[in-house]
Amino acid sequence: MRDEANALARRENPTLSEEALERMGKLQFANVQPTVIYDSGTEKTVVQISWGIFTDEEIIQAFRAWVKANRPKDVPGPPDNKGRNKARDWRVGLERLAMMRLLHRFRLRGLSAACPAAWKLYCKREWYKERKRAGEMFRKLFPFLAASGRPLGWQTQGGRSR
């Protein structure tokens, strides 16, 4: 029945494109969206966007509504990153590594004279606690190393190598 109505609409409006007929409501298509969902939770789908008809914000809102309506129930929800900023976490880890390496090269009490820029940047931090946290990050990054393994810069000039 639907196919017959679509054929009739095409015959009655030979100068109009299917897109125009669809916008006018003269063509009716089944609400079937070609999509594949894999066990990993990844989905591949095809979308049609009428760029000339909608603003960017309207397209974004429509896509947001589609995501909310079509998120599979059996796939775990979005990650809960409350209070976490992954880029910041990595930056902090790198800063701790830098502090550990500075303690390997210099004594803490002489660091302000030896590296004034680093001292100014990290002066309010607790250097030895940050060094310990850098060692914990080292464990997470290299869990396959022996438990007694330490970073090359672990030994400090001040002798605090626990």
Image (cartoon, rainbow, N blue to C red):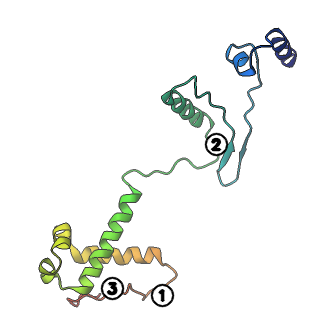
Identity of the amino acid at label 1? Ala
The spot of residue 82 in percent (x, y) is 40, 50
Q: Nearer the viewer, residue 139 or 91?
A: 91
Question: Label 2, on which residue?
Answer: 72
At label 2, counting other C-alpha atoms closer than 10 Å, the crowd grade (few under 14, some 14-19, many 20 or more) is: few
The spot of residue 3 in percent (x, y) is 86, 19
Task: Check if mark 1's residue and mark 3's residue have beta carbons within 8 Å.
Answer: no
Secondary element under disc 1, as helix, strand or loop, is loop
Secondary element under disc 3, as helix, strand or loop, is loop
The spot of residue 73 in percent (x, y) is 63, 42
Question: Label 1, on which residue?
Answer: 146
* Residue beneath the point at 74% across and 13% down: 26
Identity of the amino acid at label 2? Pro
Query: Which quadrant of the view contains residue 19?
Result: top right
Which of the two discs, 1 and 3, labels the residue nearer the N terminus?
A: 1
Which of the two discs, 1 and 2, labels the residue nearer the N terminus?
A: 2
Secondary element under disc 2, as helix, strand or loop, is loop
Establish if 98 lies above or below 51.
below
Question: Label 3, on which residue?
Answer: 153
